[in-house]
Image: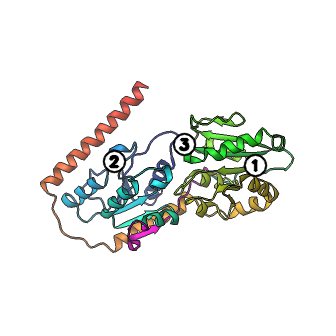
Amino acid sequence: MKISIGSHIVEGPWGGGNLFIINLSNYLIKKGHTVTYDLIDDDIDLILLTDPRGKSSSSSSYDHIDIESYKNNVNPNTLVVHRINECDERKQTKGLNDFYLKASQIADEVVFVSEWLRKVYLNIGMSKNKTSVILSGSDKDIFNKNNSSIWNKESKLKIITHHWSANLNKGYAVYKLLDDLISTEKWKNRIEFTYVGNVSKDFNLPNTKIIPPKEGNELSKILKDHHIYVTGTINEPSGNHHIEAAQCGLPIIFLDSGGTTEYCQEFGIGFTNDFELKLEQMIEDYDIYVEKMDSYFLDAEKMSEEYLNLFEYLISKRIINPHKIRVKGTIFLINQKRKKYFRILKNFLKKFLN
């Protein structure tokens, strides 16, 4: 198959969406499929729409309107899968859910990253018939239990979290609470807290060790040097941070919110307004949860296999109709090539000037 993924890969530490593209692309190529990140070819079998916001997104290659033009004027036999991992509830925006709902009308299948997120869209009118859920995963060659630290219950318990985004909904209220706990007589000799990533300017964490954003093996090594993971992210559809930590063997204390619960509930302790109580519980039951991490069930290969199975199923049901590229289609392909080369030039100049 020739598969076009609607995002270009960003180098360096970035968000979970970028890691999804990298992991899925690597898997598809390994399985012998061709992967592109644009719409410049007339023989694309399947398009994976990842972000219909187009120019307003820093990594999007094209939007649903481009896909509609491609199918109408270039190749009507191309199938479309829309992966949704965003919603208004996550960042308290307005209009995003309705926009994604409209964009999904071009799709033959809509994939959600959690059942919680699917329900968000079903509640505003999306038909369940063409939807499915595929949970996310991280690269197990990087994020695994090899050389992970186990708490000896004598030294301080080392707690960690990491986020690319500095959005307040990523859990800063919880991290501030944890930072405050460290300064109390009860906790100051029992725990320490590390935050890896971008920090909101609205929060001061004087008792926390802050490390700039990291990725890959460097991030994995830092995670493995800690004992438990905490995430306070609000209404997160999936998130990649807790998955990476879980694959490294860290039990998770997680805010019971959004899709996070689906990823963490068997491998940690959820909290609402009782974080300190649940921290005590994790300390008490640490050995139990460390043992549970051996059976953590998610990784990027499993995720990618599910996507490929879906793609192959859709292709097997496809009915091929004879077609010719229209004049508008030729013009569309030329414009897409111009966009691609302009983006390459822009990225080159950005690197050169930096």
Where residue 74 appears, as percent x and y from the top left, is 20, 58
Q: Nearer the viewer, residue 143 or 87?
A: 87
For the question of whether residue 80 can be seen, the reply is yes
Q: Nearer the viewer, residue 166 or 276?
A: 276
Q: Are there few (<14), some (14-19), or many (20+) residues within 10 Å of tag 2?
A: some
Quadrant position of the N terminus in the picture: bottom left
In the image, which residues are magenta? 122-142
Mark 1: amino acid: Ser
Q: Earlier in the sequence, mark 1 or mark 2?
A: 2
Q: Residue at x 26, y 53 (%)?
A: 66
**Which label sits on residue 120?**
none
Coloring applied to the structure: rainbow
Q: Which residue is mark 3?
A: 164
Where residue 203 appears, as percent x and y from the top left, is 61, 37
Mark 3: amino acid: Trp
- As measured in the structure, the alpha-carbon distance from the residue carrying label 3 to the one carrying label 1 is 24 Å
Q: Secondary structure at mark 2?
A: helix
Mark 2: amino acid: Gly
Q: Secondary structure at mark 3?
A: loop
- Would residue 129 be counted in the magenta stretch? yes
Q: Residue at x 67, y 36 (%)?
A: 205
Q: Which residue is mark 2?
A: 54
Between circles 1 and 2, the one closer to the viewer is 2
Where residue 79 appears, as percent x and y from the top left, is 31, 64
- As measured in the structure, the alpha-carbon distance from the residue carrying label 1 to the one carrying label 2 is 42 Å
Q: Which residue is mark 1?
A: 149
Q: Are there few (<14), some (14-19), or many (20+) residues within 10 Å of tag 3?
A: some
- Would residue 188 be counted in the magenta stretch? no
Q: Residue furthest right?
A: 154
